Image (cartoon, helix red, strand yellow):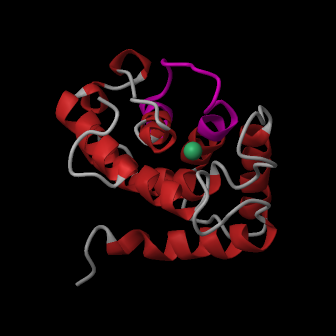
Amino acid sequence: MMTSEGRHIPIIRKALRMVQPQFRLDFASGVHGVPHWSRVWIHGRALAAALDVNPQVLAWFAFLHDSQRHNDGHDPQHGRRAADFAVRLRREGVIAERAGHEFEHLCEAMRLHTDGHTVGEVAILVCWDADWLDLARVGIRPHPHRLCTEPAREPGLIAAAVRLATGTRRDATR
Ligand SMILES: [Fe+2]
């Protein structure tokens, strides 16, 4: 029997197959590449379970939200481009799992994911928190006030996210 984690592997494979050929940055090891997207998925999956959100939204968000970056620094339009990319993938039948309102949540989450909002639909908030929880990879400790959902603000979860992002047993941002 397939585990709940295993159920999402086809989505992740599909997303990576579409993203890799057109990705402009370091796909395998960049700060906005597969290692980051995988950790966003780990956090998103956990938060989705805690808040009763469809994890498929998180799987697509994790592997698409930075897929249209032109650089690893200031690129304020990359979320909008990612949403446009998702619309194209849906039109082409690649994104077929999403009900209409969930697809809208996915696109909205990507469009606004760097704008600093903290209120909205819970499915969108979980996407943003999953991304923010991985900030320690660039030396920034995720601040509870910047996180949108109660489970993400849990100190133990933040500490675990920091350890995962920095590859340390101890919290390297303290
Ligand atoms: Fe990200």
Please tell me whether residue 10 is drawn above or below residue 143 in the rendered image.
below
Q: Which span of residues is magenta-colored?
A: 108-127
Outermost residue to the left: 156
Please tell me whether residue 54 is drawn above or below residue 128 in the rendered image.
below
Q: Residue at x 28, y 68 (%)?
A: 4
Asked if residue 100 lies left or right of residue 160, the reply is: right
Outermost residue to the bottom: 1
Q: Residue at x 64, y 35 (%)?
A: 108
Q: Quadrant of residue 34?
A: bottom right
Q: Quadrant of ligand 1?
A: top right
Asked if residue 61 lies left or right of residue 133, the reply is: right
The x and y percentages for residue 169 are 21, 51
Quadrant including the N terminus: bottom left
Does the magenta segment cover residue 109? Answer: yes
Which of these two is toward me, 147 or 29?
Answer: 29
Give the total number of marks visible in the rendering. Answer: 0
Does the magenta segment cover residue 32? Answer: no
Which of these two is toward me, 56 or 157?
Answer: 157
Q: Residue at x 65, y 66 (%)?
A: 27
Q: Residue at x 63, y 55 (%)?
A: 64
Q: Quadrant of residue 16?
A: bottom right
Quadrant including the C terminus: top left
The x and y percentages for residue 2 are 27, 80
The x and y percentages for residue 152 are 31, 32
